[in-house]
Image (cartoon, rainbow, N blue to C red):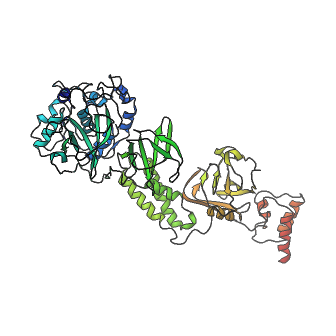
Amino acid sequence: MKRSIKRVLSMLLALTFVASLVLVPATPAEAATYRTGANGASSSYKSGKYYSNFQKITLTGDGVTDVLAIALSQTGYEEGNSTSAMGGTAGGSSNYTEYCYNMGDWGGGYGGSDYPWCATFVSWALFQSRCTDMMGYNYWCRNHTGDSSYIWCEVSCSQWANQLRRYGRFKYSAHNGGSYKPQPGDLIFFDWAGGSSGEDHIGIVVYSDSSKVYTIEGNTSDAAGLEDNGGGAYFKSYALSYGYISGYGILPYKDVAGVPDIDYSGANPTPGLYMATNSTKYVYTTETGSTYNYTMPRFTLFEVTDVCSNGRLKVKYTSGSTTVTGYIKNNTDRVVQLSSTQVDGLSDAVAAADAIYFADYSENILSLIRAKYSTAKSLLASSTSTYAQKKACADELNALIARKGEGTLVSEGAYITAFNKKITNENCNIFTPSFGTVSYSAANHKWTTNVIAKYDTNEAAYVIKSIDVCPGENVTDVTLASDEILIAVHQDTTNSASNSLKNGKYIGGAKVGDVLTFVGADPKTASMTCGAYFTYETRYIPGDVDGDDTISSTDYLQIKRHCNSSALLTGEGFLRADFNGDGTVTSTDLIAVRLICTNN
């Protein structure tokens, strides 16, 4: 990194171009798209991580939020030595930056791609965040002395500060007798001579506390203290009484109601985008664990998906081709929040609906939940659904889920977990012919009660064809016919999974020939919604072979002929003759029917 160049040269060229811009609010939740100034994005910048960072920003229309998000996304950027080295990682010393390239040559001897760029960086952030919407020499603040309500930019730090003074938008620092507490989005001006009227360097205030002001600056160094020509974009801090701070510029940013406030100090983090500014971060495997699998590099832009009760942040970021998830400490190893996600809660509400147990609800409430669940899934899948729509749907779905225990509850059934998915604990999965061969390796249908059902056109429903209670890994492969399904109900003998235990007990009463009814699930399309379950019903009296609703000697004789192979039963007659429901008709069934006839 280069250090100071002669002060007089720096004061002449010092800082940036800028463009004047009328304040134009961005459309809420507009993805940041790169704006063409004098030039579009350079090829070296577009191929680097800082352009990728830029594209991850979502503009809210709120000026302070957006300009800080854009500027902070560039933390760690380094200047290059040529226009082919402006990707941000070159570590050069010749002032070649994407920010100068994008702003370009605006006349007056300023501009190009290789000039001291601290003000250009600020101007670029204002332009790309849509806080300003005009650019060029004609829109420098010195040419618009009568327009106090605009965010005018400048190529010269001193011109910028003087214009702000004219309109009462400049506040002197504590060193210069001021009492103003700098706010997020303010411009911060430095005077290398320690004075109050010769501003030579500029940055943007991220936040301040009782003793320090924290900034994001371009053309500075990574070292503590003021750096006049350092070569990078860095997050820095200074004592509020620091002798080189001249003062602060207050810009008329657009304030959009409803955009979540960000506590840039990190004291009150929320889900959103963050930057690892001042150190690497250990990424722990669990919320409370001491073991870490990854080290997040400094200057990584990452997503926080949850804030844990112990203060750790649940994070997700990309490392090469790997998506890393885990937990980091939110402590003095600095991370800075760039944006706050508007948490609509819809994904959580859908997850809560997925987890409901059908028997905790009445069928009427279940129907309402399923209808709202369908709406929620559609909103999540749509790129045009709004925050308000998703938030309202989440509230309505959660309110329905909260009606647990209300009304006459569903009294019986076996809950359904999924279609065509490998069995795990507490699962009741349904396999269809599209799954292929139901094998041990593919389906894991061991320690399960495996029910094969066949579609009966007369019943317009699936009818149980066989029931096999599998004692372990000694399970046979199953190839289903086009009109068959296999229901694998996980057995749980330890009572560690209460719903699985209920399933096991319920399915234990089913018999071959029972008719199945599916609620919230359709085996023909392998689709399901929340709170899905199935029931079974015996549509005839076991042993009543002739179907006259009584068990008599006629039934006994038909079973006897079947057992001695003189007249084999088939179809429904066979199912009726299978008194004990084990899928066969044997002497055991014959004896049971004879006892009934004798007692009658």
500 and 218: which one is in front? Answer: 218
Residue 381 in picture, x, y percent from top left: 45, 47
Where, quadrant-wise, is the N terminus in this rendering? top left
Q: Is residue 439 visible?
A: no
Q: Relative to 215, is 555 above or below?
A: below
349 and 84: which one is in front? Answer: 84
Q: Relative to 17, is 164 above or below?
A: below
Q: Quadrant of residue 251?
A: top left
Residue 464 in picture, x, y percent from top left: 71, 58
Question: Who's the residue at 54% across and 66% down the image?
Answer: 363
Residue 141 in picture, x, y percent from top left: 14, 36
Q: Which residue reaches farthest bottom?
A: 600
228 and 54: which one is in front? Answer: 228
Residue 477 in picture, x, y percent from top left: 74, 46
Q: Is residue 223 visible?
A: yes
Taking 148 as reference, is 264 left or right? right
Q: Relative to 351, is 401 above or below?
A: below
Where, quadrant-wise, is the C terminus in this rendering? bottom right
The mark total stands at 0
Question: Who's the residue at 69% across and 55% down the image?
Answer: 453
Q: Relative to 57, is 366 above or below?
A: below
Taking 15 as reference, is 143 left or right? left
Taking 535 as reference, is 237 left or right? left
Taking 451 as reference, is 566 left or right? right
110 and 544: which one is in front? Answer: 110
Question: Who's the residue at 35% across and 33% down the image?
Answer: 77
